[in-house]
Every structure is written in C-alpha cells, then in structure tokens.
Amino acid sequence: MSKSKFENIAFISTSKPEAKQALSKLVNKYGNCDAAHADVIVPLGGDGFMLDTLRKHISLLRRGLPVFGMNQGTVGFLMNHFSTEGLRERLAKSQAAKIRPLRMKAQTPGGEVGALAINEISLLRQTSQAAHIHISIDGEERMKRLIADGILIATPAGSTAYNLSAHGPAIPLGSNVLALTPISAFRPRRWRGALLKNTAKVKFEILDPGKRPVSAVADSTEFRNVSTVEVEQADDIEFTLLFDKGHELDEKILREQFAT
C-alpha cells in the first residue's frame, strides 16, 4: 500500500454526541469505507476507544492496516488532534509507531482464560485484604512474597498510563523493555519495581487466593479470582499507529519524562 494515497478511510466513533458529530463531518467530507477494504482506520474517541479498536480489528491490523486516531475523548495520549481539514495530507506525512501487545494466560475457578493488552496487565486485590503474590521470571523466583494492592506489567506504549500513576517509569519506544511496577507495596516497602527485557516470561502466583482474592485485568478485560497469571510479549502481533509529525508517540513519552 502506498502511504501517499489513503483513498479509502474507515471512520468509527464512540457513542458520545461530540464524537458522532465529528464522524458526520468527516464522512460528509471524505466518505466512509468498511474497515476490511480500507487503507487506514480512523477512530474518533479517547485512548480507551483506541484500545477497543485495536482489539476489535486485530485480524486486519496484523496484516499491516494502520490506525490514525483523532481525539474526541479525555486524555487522548494515543490520539492525534481533531480536525476535518487536510486529512489525507496529514496521513501522508504521518509517522508510524510499531507496538506489540502483551499476552496473558490466567487460571480461574472456571478454567484457563486469556487476553491481550496494549497498555498493561494489572493484578488487583478484590477485597480489603492486601494481595500476596509470588513472582518468577523466566522460571526463576524473583520475589517470594509481594504484599501490596497489586502489581502491573506495562508496555512502552502503556507506560505513561496506569504505570506512570503507580510511580513506574515512562519507557521509550524501541527500548525493548517492559515495566514491572508494584501498586501500593507494603512489603518489601521500598521496592519500586523492575525493568524487564521484552523477551521475559513473567509468572504471578496468588498466595492464599481464598482469603486474598485477586483480579487480573488486561487493559479493560477483567478476570476475577485468578490463581496464576502468566504474561509475555505477543511477538506474533504488531500494530501500526500513525501520528502527526512532531507529535509522535515516542516524543509524547519523552515529554512525559520531563513533565512537572
């Protein structure tokens, strides 16, 4: 596909009135195409809607179909600014960011479940009782017992989301690392997490899950009462996000590291 064309655009939006109005303006100006026959998907919403779009169209995106989001939500870290003018010119000049999601497998009382996460996978206590979690990486025990509200593992693209609010590091794209960040750790009290190679296979075992139940959340997909959770990068899946020149995802991540 020639990057200079982008003739066929698939517009989709959230159900918010402002997003629907933006959708109508864009469709009137550029037309609309089914995603299966599009050169690019343009979601209109916030970061949550972008993540939903990536999951919904994963079979198309795995074949290289790019996504150029425009912000009609709250944060819009994964989105570009909204404008109806010069869209094809913006697309032709856009910069691509390649991101890989995390793949999670978890054991629940009903059996094994799985999900993908573009931002992060979080383990969270379900009750007032702190979670007790055993951590091993590549088959080797790294922490016998973490006592905390939970723990998360974040991709570079998701490192400025929940991970950053939990005092984890913002990670540049292309650094080939993942952030392992505790959430309100009680013991070890001064542990601030770790940076892992993106080839790492991480296993969490919930200690005393009957008394201290834990949920596993892949972005917004939640599984309750998990007993073990295994996480690794999904090397067979790659998403292409497009950003306006000067507002690339790696530039946004860099700016977050110097935010005051």
Image: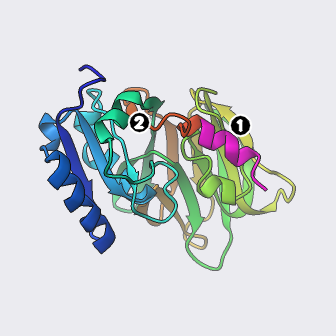
Q: Secondary structure at mark 2?
A: strand
Q: Residue at x 66, y 76 (%)?
A: 129
**In this rendering, would 190 be left or right of 38?**
right
* Picture coordinates of residue 140, whole percent (x, y): 67, 33
Dot 1 corresponds to which residue?
195
Say if 223 sits above or below 196 in the image. Answer: below
Q: Is residue 155 magenta?
A: no
State how the image is colored. Answer: rainbow
Q: Is residue 170 visible?
A: no
Q: Which residue is mark 2?
A: 242
What residue span does the magenta drawing correspond to? 251-260
Is 161 left or right of 99, judged from the image as shown?
A: right
Instruction: Identify which residue is drawn at 67% across, 50% down.
Output: 134
Rendered position, 218 above or below 238: below
Q: Nearer the viewer, residue 213 or 99?
A: 99
Q: Secondary structure at mark 1?
A: strand
Q: Which corner quadrant holds the C terminus? A: bottom right
Principal SS element in the magenta part?
Answer: helix
Q: Does residue 97 appear anywhere in the picture?
A: yes
